[in-house]
Image (cartoon, rainbow, N blue to C red):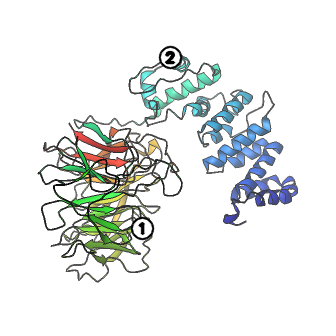
Amino acid sequence: MRHEDAADQFLPKMIWYAYARFADEDLEEALKLALKSKLPEFSNSVFWYAARKDLNKAVEYANQLSDPEQISRFIAIVHQVLAGKKTAKAPAGWDKLVLKANSDPATQKHFTALNKIFNGQSTNKDTPAARITQGKAAFMICAACHAPGKTQPGPSLEEIAQVYTNKNDIIQWIKKPGKKRANYPAMPAFNHMDDHSLQLIAEYLLSVKKTSPTKKLPATTVGFKKIQLFDKYITEGASIGDVNADGKPDIIAGPLWWQGPDFKKSHAYAPVKIYPIKGPGMSAYSSNFFTFPDLITKDKWTDILKVGVPGQPAQLAINPGEKPLPADNTKHQCEHSKAQDHICNESPQYVQALPGEKKQLLSFSKGHITLSIPTDDPKKPWRVLNITPPNSGIKMGEHGLGIGDINGDKLPDILEKRGWWQQPKNWDRKTHWKFHPFPFAPQQGGAQMFSYDINGDGLNDVVTALNAHSWGMAWYQQVRDGAKITFIKHTVMTDKPEGNPYGVCFSQPHAMSCADIDGDGIKDIVTGKCFYAHNGRDPGAEQPAVLYWFKTTRHKDGTTELMPYQIDNNSGVGRQISTGDLNGDGKMDIVVGNKKGVFVFIQK
């Protein structure tokens, strides 16, 4: 059974019809085969047959499935098998199984119907732990709006548990919720839910209070004022630079820029195009991912180095000076010139990696990690320096890239998901850099990567997202054994609230910035959830588009952690975040652009 046959609508059924008589002879062997099969329809057929013949055995093997969608399909099969029955005994392992399923409306419907058939039964229903497990399973119907450690359309479970202290109050709230908080929508009444399920849900919610993260986030004086500059999708990033040479920072996002210091007046430098949030193929991806403003040509006007979707060239937009294009421009653009072909990493940076040079564009291009430098005539193609040799595993569209002095020789090295590349002393611009493997983000790779002394021991550490389209964030403590350099992983976030001591968990951390947010002299991290990075196909896509700053905190006992403070829950990030002092008050401000629009966060 080949993987490419998985989508065939006839082959799986043909195999099942041929195999059915053997399944009848040895059900366990059939279930083992279903677990290994690459053909979902064949597996479904085996589980359907097993559920009819021995439901307990079918549930036992279904508990070995790891894919929530497969488990949800099995729950639908059980509902189909038991359709028409008024009561039935819950099979062994049922409580455990339903906790692994998706919480989509269809699965919730099947589960609600089955819960009535099983009448709240469980194989160990009388123990408090079992009742909490049943309550968690019954709570699936509420999971679209409430979750542990997360603010969704409704408050998190921890917030609910803080407000309600007994079962009766929780049950009354579920039956007649009303609108209690201005920043949350009104919750619908659940009068249709049976008393037994209500009791179980109440017990589960009260248990959250006892098991929620024990660490309380210390208060912070840092706060931000949110301003939305644009409410349509034009870009995946935003940056800061003095475009009109008036000495005041401006904000650039895609083809538009907003004039500081109040950012009320906007201009264009290229045609303004509004993109859909979802669509087929590449139609729902802006052609604007990154903008890097700098004084590149030989005048006083800040130009903009642009990077688009992976595979496209980097272009230099030449500042037209005193005659910017109007903000409603859809046809014209200022002078553009190609800087470098085929930029194919989703975390390029504009950095000072080489001594005595203007900044360089750090990226992947044509199978290499590259640094490109403006020539004497920056309107001509830039000089491209290959850091890595051919066939070194550099692939199109990968994530995670940055610089930092790892070995302490005052020369910035290059970070990527698989390790770091050491800059040679007195580099001749031809020799490939030495690779030091280390699995910083061994799956898809994260966002922009940074290296700074996180724990204050004098050695530069590494911080990175673990997967730009999934979950996770970590910092890696540098340790030395003589001349040998390695790292110890410190997890910041996982795919569950329990993976963070403060219960913070969000997916798609596709952009990251490093800056001293609270002014204590130590760099911090800014990141968040990339809203609909893959048009809603990534894990956690429908959860709030949050934006956080993580305070680098060095405790007196010698430990260090990145403490999460939420900035906003309805903006998130795109592919590029930028930080800088926008109003001259000495405090770091933040700008982002993504499918929700363009936002600026002014620190109070």
Residue type pointed to by label 1: Gly
Q: Looking at the figure, which quarter contains the C terminus?
A: top left
Quadrant of residue 452 within the rendered picture: bottom left
The residues tagged by marks 1 and 2 sit, at their Cα atoms, a distance apart of 57 Å
Taking the image as shown, residue 274 lies to the left or right of residue 191, namely left
Secondary structure of the residue carrying tag 2 is helix
Picture coordinates of residue 272, whole percent (x, y)? 34, 52
Residue at (22% x, 43% y) in the render: 265
Residue at (34% x, 38% y) in the render: 568
Name the foreground residue: 201 vs 582.
582
Name the foreground residue: 436 vs 210.
436
Picture coordinates of residue 125, whole percent (x, y)? 66, 29
Residue type pointed to by label 2: Asp
| Residue that sits furthest to the front in the current view | 331
Picture coordinates of residue 346, whole percent (x, y)? 39, 61
Q: Residues within 10 Å of mark 2 (few under 14, many from 20)?
A: few
Look at the image and tell me whether residue 59 can be seen.
yes
| Count of residue discs | 2
Q: Looking at the figure, which quarter contains the N terminus?
A: bottom right
Name the foreground residue: 339 vs 179.
339
Secondary structure of the residue carrying tag 1 is loop
Q: Residues within 10 Å of mark 1 (few under 14, many from 20)?
A: some
- Indicate which disc residue 169 carries: 2
Question: Would you place residue 395 above or below residue 39 in this image?
Answer: below
Picture coordinates of residue 190, whole percent (x, y)? 58, 21
- Indicate which disc residue 311 carries: 1
Mark 1 or 2: in front is: 1
| Comes first in the chain, label 1 or label 2 | 2
Question: Would you place residue 324 above or below residue 122 in this image?
Answer: below
Taking the image as shown, residue 297 lies to the left or right of residue 276, namely left
